[in-house]
Amino acid sequence: MTDPEIQSPPTHKPRPWVDLLVSIIIPSVILMKLSGDEYLGSVMALVIGLAFPLGWGLFELVRYRKYNFIAVLGIVSVGLTGGIGLMELDAGWLAIKEAAVPAVIGIAVLVSTRTRYPLVRTLLYNPSVLNVDKIQAVLKENGSEEEFEARLLKASYFFSLTFLFSSIMNFVLAKWIVTSPSGTQAFNEELGRMTLVSYPMIAIPSMIMMIAIFYYLWRSIRRLTGYTLEDVMAPHLAAQHDNKSSDTSTGNGS
């Protein structure tokens, strides 16, 4: 008998609209609109509402086998929120939890700069986004490796600041919006409102900061190597870009 073929995990494709729907919109609607006794009740609404982001996060981890620190911490965060509501703890614990999760990530980013595997490399400067081997070869040839490492370290500091911003804003929003005792219908409604408000007030600004950090990193690569973005895109992204360009030119020519 031969050993069964070991299949590699499927390639993860970002689905921001699905993430937004499952992690924010559906839970918020359930918590805000179905927490009354005439519907699901406060406990069941909390359980079902938080089951969506928790289940989706677990599915992503199992399906794509990406057991990274931030993804696991996100699942723990949802579990803690449910625990605070179900155990009817003081609502102040929610603000502490909301601030603690991004704070832990920010500290982890800083600590990782002293290791061989800085988190900024994992999230921004990695082979799934950029052709790292090609970039490193030119940096070595030009004697620019140390300068690039210094810029990468600076990007890590900027990266940790985005989580500091998120930590502060999470605490402020939680203290401002969630004021009712946990385990009540009002608590669920406020939790759903906080989830919705956090997207434009925290998630989008943090995303803009991330894009700015990537742009800084990209400008550093361009300055030190002379490559354009198309030159250093990861091979699979470059192939997709070429296919889209080819389809566009074919469509214009027809």
Image: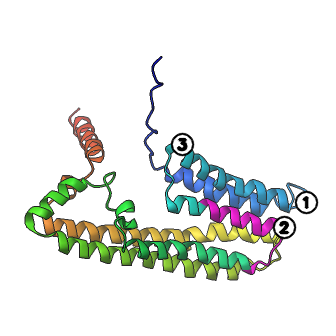
Viewer can see residue 146? yes
Secondary structure beneath label 2: helix
Relative to residue 41, is residue 164 depicted above or below?
Answer: below
Q: Amino acid at mark 1?
A: Asp
Viewer can see residue 226? no
Question: x, y percentage for residue 95?
Answer: 67, 78
Considering the image in quadrants, where does the C terminus appear? Answer: top left
Mark 2 vs 1: CB contact within 8 A: yes
**Gap between marks 2 and 3, in whole Å?**
34 Å
The residue under the point 58% across, 72% down is: 101
Quick check: 245 left or right of 200? left
Q: Amino acid at mark 2?
A: Gln
Question: x, y percentage for residue 181?
Answer: 83, 76
Question: x, y percentage for residue 24?
Answer: 62, 60
Q: Which mark is residue 63?
A: 3
Relative to residue 22, is residue 191 depicted above or below?
Answer: below
Residue 76 is inside the magenta segment: yes
Instruction: Please rate how many residues cluster around mark 3, counting C-alpha atoms within 10 Å: few if below 14, some from 14 to 19, many from 20.
Output: few
Instruction: Please report whichever mark, 1 or 3, sits nearer to the chain's N-terminal start.
Output: 1
Front position in the image: 203 or 4: 4
**Gap between marks 2 and 1, in whole Å?**
8 Å
Front position in the image: 67 or 92: 67
The residue under the point 61% across, 57% down is: 23
Instruction: Please rate how many residues cluster around mark 2, counting C-alpha atoms within 10 Å: few if below 14, some from 14 to 19, many from 20.
Output: many
Quick check: 69 left or right of 142? right
**Gap between marks 1 and 3, in whole Å?**
36 Å
Residue matched to label 2: 185
| Magenta extent | 75-92
